Image: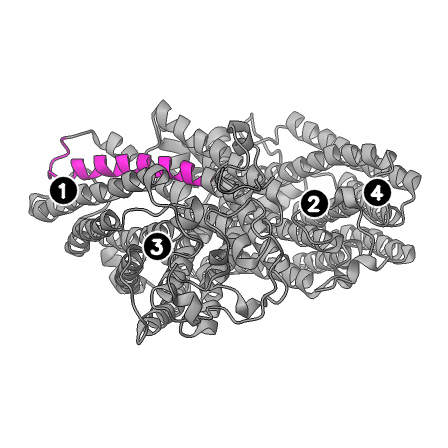
Amino acid sequence: MANHAEHHIVPKRVYFAVFFALIILTLVTAYIATVDLGRWNIFVALAIAIFKASIVALFFMHVWYSTRLTKMIVMCSIFWLILLLFITMADIWTRTWMGVPGR
Amino acid sequence: MITASPAVEPRRNYLNQTEGLKSWLLTHDHKRIGILYLIGITIFFGLGGIFAALIRLELATPAGDLVESNIYNKFFTMHGVIMVFLFLIPSIPAVLGNFLIPLMIGAKDVAFPRLNLLSWYIYMVGSMFVITSLILGGVDTGWTFYTPFSTSYSNGYVIATGLGIFINGFSSILTGLNFIVTIHRMRAPGLTWFRLPLFVWAHYATSMIQVLGTPVIAVTLFLLVLERGLHIGFFDPAYGGDPVLFQHMFWFYSHPAVYIMILPSMGVVTEIISTFSSKKPFGYTFIAFSSVAIAVFGFIVWGHHLFVSSQSVYAGMVFSILSYVVAIPSAIKVFNWTVTMYKGSVRLTTPMLYALGFIGLLTIGGLTGLFLACLGMDVHLTDTYFVVAHFHYVMVGGAIMGFLGGIHYWWPKIFGRMYDEGWSKISAVIIFVGFNLTFFPQFLLGYMGMPRRYHAYPAEFQVLNVLSSAGASILGLGYLIPFCYLLWSLKYGPKAPPNPWGSPGLEWQIESPPRTENFDVTPVITHEAYTYTEEVVHVG
Amino acid sequence: MASHASTLQHHFENAEQQKDASTIGMWVFLVTEVMFFGGLFLAYFVYRQAYPAAFASASNKTNLIIGTVNTTVLICSSLTMAMAVHFASIGKKHLIVLFLVLTLLLGGTFLGVKAYEYNDKWVHHEVPGHNFDCEGCTDAAHTPLFFALYFGMTGLHATHMIIGAVIILILIKNAAKGAYGPEWHTPVEMFGLYWHFVDIVWIFLFPLLYLIDRSGAPR
């Protein structure tokens, strides 16, 4: 049960590296939005956002250095969010898939 | 603080350690907080019961002759809102979970005692919002608040009630959060996960649901209140909104919520069956994992409440199959409880009567759920009394019987007094009989087509409705009797020994009632859970 | 391991258990926040998929430059917060206070810019329910849904930031008194987790609300 994470001091250069990555990616995502990629715009935007969120979580929030339990809790939150979004959207996406008498 | 001369003064325990209202209202002690919750939920159970009585009174005759339909709508709405959110959701976790989990894991308190007290205050404030809306005139939307009726057309106090439930949700979330951290990090040395009592496993699974599901209904009610107040159009088709989206969001929580209501009861029943069979629960690992499985699978079946809502047929099929799957872990538990009793030395004490009633009624309730999970049958049965009977079998025949069993089982520990076994057995039987008389006819009514939430019905349904209303009066009487003898026992009941039932649980190894700090010395656990030895089984 | 006696609560065996419990407790709370905002993200995805043209033209009514600048402001506040936690863990009192104050200022700037944007929307009749008129928007009948989600999601986000600002003030006061050091700096660390989470929410809100169909290509 010993938690070594709290004794670990993250070097400041890690924070600065993450910071610069976040700034660059913000500018990139804003710029790419003005380029017409058709239906791929949203996927690119979300991919960049997911990457940015990940480095904030892993390094600013110390998840990279944390216990297995903390990592498990983070994974659960992502998993349950995906459940909520995916299953509800699955209803909407499949509403026309099967014919129903009278519809 | 402990007095040195027990012959002169009664031994100090958490009840009399400090005195005065302030010492209760500002307590950090998980045991006192459990009792604060017990007072709250008992009051609200009574209030919800009054609405049940009004409903059954109206339904004793086919004509809508007691009240107008809009008033009747308020009866069943307030009954549902109060019973689900103010009574059932908190009941076992906030009362028995709070009291027992630290004791069962050898801890001095939960991880966040001040947060625990805050949870109680949040619960009381949220409940006051609901009661206020009731006094002002109540809500008539059904406890499910479907849009666009609740947002655009209802004349009731939807916002006040919605806010009340929103606030109560945080109480539930914080209780769940507290239990998760407590169970992970406050276990006594030697108490590994698989040495935990199954009551603790049940509450861990329940806490997962509370933490993951409740925020979604919170945001749903938030949007409901915004829409009703500002007419924005989240759910109003006139603005492009989708009422079915509300149903998805509402049931994403409200289906797992029913597992919040039943899982703790299952944990209670496991403890009771084990103690009164003097045998460790059969298939410990299966019971533990099935609790978590119910919690997880319970999150992916909510669409079975939307079968006739214009949800996609394809999604309906998937939800239907998953709804069958979620019954499996519950069935596993029923087998485990039954086999636990086999070749055990069974004592039919009051808690055991409630536990046995629980098993039978939960089985009926669960099996009738499978009828509803079947897409084709649900088209016929949805929104009929079949559904009403199904969920009352699991929530009353299941959850409430488990709650009463747990209250009777742990009463000696919590209050240090024994209640009268004769009266308690009689009322357990009255409750069982009254319950079945109330709700079994409703399966038949539903199958024959009587819709729910109607204050009038065709004359051919009257006989069954009269039986149901008669049963309700017996059930009501059955609930009143424990209230009397349990209160009576507080002053006049014989003092309880530390372990009146001969149970090996950790909470039974300390005095009744416990001292404020629970344990003199943090226990070190060296044996498996449910280790029945000669000296433990020898009662007293 | 030395336990800072006055900060050790009586129901914990030692400071390590207490710190561990606090960390898990905060993460479990953040899980509830994920699901809370998640419901709004669900509504967003449902309606964006139903009315893509309305969402695209409504999104173009937000100011791209202001949104991008505000996003960088918030990212800066995350850096300063990480620095504050860092200096709390090594007990450099003045630097803790400095970086907490910077975080507060940057957060305040973000909120100020948001207030400006909200006012701008009000003036241009883009607040649903109040003389709403999405000028020049395609599928204008469904644009109120976008703006409702815009105000709902950024409003909830801003509420979280305001609560955060109040807590920072308390942390600054305590830090100035020298309360935080290597043995105990849990409140700063826990608040850091909260602040970074609020930043993560914005990292998703920015592209979803500001960056729909910005290329101006005909559809």
Residue B154: where, in percent of width, then height?
35, 31
- Label 2: chain letter: C
Is the C-beta separation of discs 4 and 3 under 8 Å?
Answer: no
Q: Range of the magenta residues?
A: B37-65
**Amino acid type, residue under disc 4 in the picture:** Tyr
Q: Residue at x 57, y 40 (%)?
A: B3
Farthest residue toward the top? B136
Residue B273 highlighted magenta (yes or no): no
Is the C-beta separation of discs 2 and 4 under 8 Å?
Answer: no
**Amino acid type, residue under disc 3 in the picture:** Gly
Give the alpha-carbon distance from disc 2 to disc 1, as whole Å. 61 Å
**Amino acid type, residue under disc 1 in the picture:** Tyr
Same chain for labels 4 and 3? Say yes or no: no
Residue A101 visible within the image:
no
Same chain for labels 2 and 4? Say yes or no: yes
Residue B47 highlighted magenta (yes or no): yes
Residue matched to label 4:
C180
Q: Residue at x 25, y 30 (%)?
A: B71
* SS for dot 2: loop
Q: Residue C9's mark?
A: 2
Badge 4 local density, few (<14 within 10 Å), some, or many (20+)?
Answer: many
Disc 2 vs disc 1: which is toward the camera?
Answer: 2
Badge 1 local density, few (<14 within 10 Å), some, or many (20+)?
Answer: some
Q: Quadrant of the N terminus of chain C?
A: bottom right
Between B506 and B365, the one lying in front of the other is B506
Give the alpha-carbon distance from disc 3 to disc 1, as whole Å. 33 Å
Same chain for labels 2 and 1? Say yes or no: no
Q: Is residue B149 left or right of residue B434?
A: right
Is the C-beta separation of discs 2 and 1 under 8 Å?
Answer: no
Q: Residue at x 47, y 62 (%)?
A: B505
Q: Quadrant of residue C155?
A: top right
